[in-house]
Amino acid sequence: YRLYYGRLLVLYGISLVRAKHHAGSIETLKEAAAIFEDLKEYKYLPQVYNGVGTCYTELYNDYVKAKEYYEKGISISLKINNQRYAQIIYNNIAEIYREQDEYSKALEYYKQSAEVAKVIQRKYSEMLVELNMALLRTAMEDYYNAISSLNYCNAIISENKDLGDISRYLFEFEAEYYYRVGYFELSKCYAQKSVDMCTTWGIPVSKDSLLFRRLSENRLTGELDYRRDMELCVDIFHDNLFKLGRVACLQLAEIYLEKGRLEDAREFLSLGLK
């Protein structure tokens, strides 16, 4: 009975995570973890620990607690040979290090995640990790290897036609990459492709795509709308996308400074530093 109850708690906790009700999901998943630990039913723990770590990241921006649970998940996954969750958690730890600008550590964990994805032949996961590495390398200004990752992803898509909406993530990367290297027209084009794909599939439009479309438009037209741009930044932070929010504020502040709008630029910087 307790095992069945614990599994129900996991289903309920994960549903709360997906619905962004993270506060309740943490307590629910911790209760499930305690049951599995007591019963020595370790096979259920990687998913639970990963869920708790995700909650701490997305709700509280608490990377210390998130890493604590991710490390527990990795430890159990390796002991019971659950490669699927090892791959997922390696990627999640890498994301934390990328958020903290610890790029060498992030790259190390991304590589481990990619290697596991190749071993278990999960092409969708492998491509997502490659795209994450490409974004990381772009931030490191390692454009040669970023393009290599991009080409590798294109090869995966060409060889596998059943990867669903994966192309939208590729479009998101291309939008950010081309913006950072100064090709604003191409950046806007790829951002719009991602937006159009999300709309067609009936799924939420990525804030990354909306941001880089906006940034490219501002660069190309020179026409700035402070209220609209600030609302986008606030929406990004509201979704707990802290790294992206800081990027948005910094990039918009730079654009507004170039136009001589010093007070507006200061407001973006102030938001980004909160």
Image: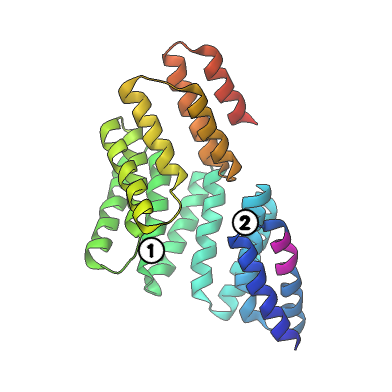
Of 65 and 79, nearer the camera is: 65
Q: Residue drawn 53% across and 77% down?
A: 82
Q: Earlier in the sequence, mark 2 or mark 1?
A: 2
Seen in the picture, residue 56 relative to 256 is either above or below; the reply is below
SS for tag 2? loop
The amino acid on which the numbered mark 1 sits, given as a three-letter code, is Glu
Magenta: main secondary structure: helix
Q: Pointer 2: what residue?
A: 20
Q: Seen in the image, is 241 located left or right of residue 137? A: right
Seen in the picture, residue 144 relative to 4 is either above or below; the reply is above
Which picture quadrant has residue 75? bottom right
Q: Seen in the image, is 128 located left or right of residue 102? A: left
Residue 12: percent from the left, percent from the top? 66, 71
Q: Residue drawn 67% across and 78% down?
A: 8
Crowd around label 1: few <14 · some 14–19 · many ≥20 (10 Å)? many
Tell me the magenta residue range: 24-29
Q: Pointer 1: what residue?
A: 126
Q: Seen in the image, is 98 located left or right of residue 11? A: left
